[in-house]
Structure formats: structure tokens, C-alpha cells
Image (cartoon, grey):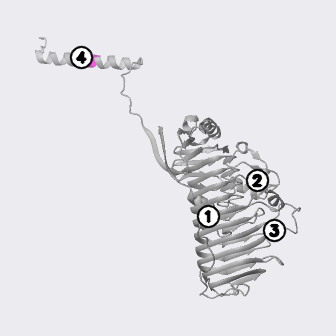
Amino acid sequence: MGLLRRNPIETQVMKSVFIVVVVALILRGGESRGVTKAKPKAPKKFESFEYSAMNCRAHSASLTEFGGVGDGKTSNTKAFQTAISKLSQYATDGGAQLFVPAGKWLTGSFSLTSHFTLYLHKDAVLLASQDLNEWPVLKALPSYGRGRDAAAGRYSSLIFGTNLTDVIVTGENGTIDGQGEFWWQQFHKKKLKYTRPYLIEIMFSSDIQISNLTLLNSPSWNVHPVYSSNILVQGITIIAPISSPNTDGINPDSCTNTKIEDCYIVSGDDCVAVKSGWDEYGISFGMPTKQLVIRRLTCISPYSATIALGSEMSGGIQDVRAEDIVAINTESAVRIKTAVGRGAYVKDIYVRRMTLHTMKWAFWMTGNYGSHADGNYDKNAFPEITGINYRDVVAENVTMAARLEGIADHPFTGICMSNVTIGLAKKAKKQPWTCTDIQGITSGVTPTPCSLLPDQGTDKPGGCDFPTDDLPIDMVEIKKCTYRSNV
């Protein structure tokens, strides 16, 4: 047979295909030996945002720069401690801010530093560790003399600070989850050697801001500023099961010049509890809570108060101003809790513009609360309760208008109620008012109050007092701050 011949064009095509295949094989072989083609560098990206704060910072860092891992499993206690320790060097150089990115950051207790901001991304969740080794034990507070859950000391709070100046915990509504179920079970089983930790506690400090955060399932109290001054708590959402033990929302304790505003709280205890020490220990420590503003608070707490004054009030409580308060399905609105042995005073309390829906009591004052630190309290330490003012209150579906119980021979005095309308529930108590050992007046109150609160008539000018001056915390300037960092 004769040989097949290829035309010149076909031959050229075959040569070209051969060359392409050879080059491809060479390139593939080069890659297998680690020879790669250089890729152009991606442009740098930055994490940048603005937020409002009492003070801005000159230096910034992210938790990931210190080994933080946001997988919800790895402990970040050391990462937080290391980051804050390193950033503390900038306290005298414009301060520093630590950014917590999106992720789930498991951690035990850590302590803050001065001139410092902790900022949580909107998708950041701090998860409280359930490893007791990550919770240092502190001495009992000096104004309490013992722990609340046990006579010994107390576990340090998740976010803790003492002897600080200018400290901010804020975010873009980031979340702090106390994973409290573990602690609640230990409490109910009486297995705790020490008092449960709080989520945030700052003590012996000044110029504090806690804002724009969501706090979930605290082991006990949520926010506890104590022995401190110039405090702003703003835009906080607090949620815990209504049956959870002692999950108070915000507890200013022996503090001066504090503002709590725009907060939403669902809890198993008082939404706001104002305190100043317990029995002889609080009397001896002698540090009152005073100059407190509470505005635009919404509370749901079926077994406790919207705002409680006491029961630990042995350092005194004075000049509390609460306005624009909403309570839904809550046991009582503003409750005064005290007892013989507490001593000190609750005075100059001003409340206006409350809207209450489904309450057990609209007003509740208790002079026999009990619950003493020990048996050594002074049986002759009688608290003085005077100058309690309520005005412009509307309530509906209320079981009982008021339960007002003073102390025999030491009545609660200077009680004033004006422009108050209380709509009783279908199954309300037959006697809407219970009053013993109290003195005061009313004006324009429905239903008709008890005889110890005589009606002055609707023509009484001005009604009950409410101060017109501003407290120093209202004059604090809020600044626009910026965070910028490589990501």
C-alpha cells in the first residue's frame, strides 16, 4: 500500500498542537516542584466604624492580635488578659481600645484598665466560661460584710475593674452571654462556696460608661457599679428567664452621679435595684447612693420591682429621679425595701410619668423586709424614709393600688402622690389600699387613697415635687469616636 501524505497546512497544525502540549506539561511539572507564578497582592482592607463615647482613644487593637479564637470552644481568658495588659501602656498616651470581632469568644473573668475601651462587634458574643478555675475569688464587699449566696467571698465578675478612671464597655449591640443555667443550678442545689459572679462590675472607679450591649443569662446581677462616681449606663438590653434567681438588671451601689437611660430589661428580679450596703456593715462604710437619674426604662419582671430602693440601703439613698418608665407584667413599680437594723435613710425620691400594665401593686413600701447579713445588726438602727414623690402615673389591670407598710413608731413620712389613675383588674382586692405607719398627702388620685394619705384636691398647685435642675452627669459631653484597624 502506498504511504499516506499530509498536506503542509495539516502538518503545521500538528506541530503547533505538539508545542502547546509540551509547554503545558513543562508548566505543570514546574508547579509540582514548587515553582509558582507570582500573584498580584490584594489591596489592604480595614475595619473602620464610629461610635459615641465619653472619651475617644489614640490606640487600637483587635483581640485576634493577641491569640483570640472566636470558635465558641477555645478559652480566650488569657487573650483578654494579655491584650488589656499590653494596651495599658497607652493609658498616659491617649488611651487604647480593644475590638472584639464577630465570633463566639469563650472566656472567664478578666479585669479592665484605665483610659480604656472594650468594644464588641454587633455579631460578637462573649460566652462566660463554666470552668470555675477561670473565676478568681474576691473578698466580700466591705459594705456587705459577707457574700450574698454564701458567707465567704465571691467570684470575680466576668468583666471586672477596680480603682480605675475613664473606662468604657460598649459596642454595636454586641452580646455578653453569662450562660447562667450552670450557676442557677448550683445555687438551687446549695453547692456554691462563694457568691455567683456578675456580668459587669466596676468598683472604686470614676468616669464609667456601659452602653449599647445585650446581656443574656447572667449568673446573678447583670451590671453592678459600686463605690464609684460619674457613671453612664445607656442603651442596654438585659434578658434572663423570669424564674432565674437574683438576675437583677442594673444595681448602682454606693454610687454618686449616675445616669441609667434607654434600657430594656426582662429579669427574674428587680430591673433596677438601688443599694448602699447591708446593716451594720453598710452603716460603718457610710457611702450613700445619690444623684441618680433613671429615664426611659422598660421593665418586665413578674416577681419583682421595676425600680427597688433597697433592701440593702444602710449607707443611705438620696436624690433619685426617675421618669418615663414603662412596666409590663411586673410585680410593682417603685418599691422601697427596708427593715429595723438597716439604719440610714431613703429620701428625696422623685418619680413621674410612669405607664404600668398588669401589676400586682402600683406602689409598695416595706418596713419589715428582714434578710440580715448576720445576727449582729443594731436593733435600734431605724431607717428614715421621707420625701417620696410620685406624679403623673397611669396604670391598668392592677390587683392592688398600694401596699404601704412603715415601721411602728418610726413612720414613713412626706409621701406625695398626684395625678395618679390606677385601673383595677377584674379580680382585684376588695381593699385597694393598705396603709400602716405612714404619713403623706395625695391630689387627683384614683381609686380613693387610704385615710393616712388625705386628698388635697385637684386644685393643689404643682402637685408633687420633681427637680428642675440638671445633675452633673447630664452635662457630660459625648464624643464621636473612630476605630480603624487592618483586617
Question: Is 442 in front, or is 79?
Answer: 442
Q: Earlier in the sequence, mark 4 or mark 2?
A: 4
Percent x, y of residue 304: 68, 69
Looking at the rendered image, the disc whose residue lies closer to the viewer, 1 or 2, is 1
Q: 483 above or below 317?
A: above
**What is the secondary structure assignment of the residue under circle 1?**
strand
Gap between marks 1 and 2, in whole Å? 29 Å
**What is the secondary structure assignment of the residue under circle 3?**
loop
The residue range painted magenta reads: 18-22
Gap between marks 1 and 3, in whole Å? 27 Å
Looking at the rendered image, the disc whose residue lies closer to the viewer, 2 or 3, is 3
Question: Is 149 in front, or is 257?
Answer: 257
Q: Earlier in the sequence, mark 1 or mark 3?
A: 1
Residue labelled with disc 3: 370
Question: Which amino acid type corresponds to the residue marked 2 in the rendered image?
Answer: Thr
Side of 179 where 24 appears, left or right = left
Query: Quadrant of residue 216 in the image?
Result: bottom right
Question: Which amino acid type corresponds to the residue marked 1 in the rendered image?
Answer: Val
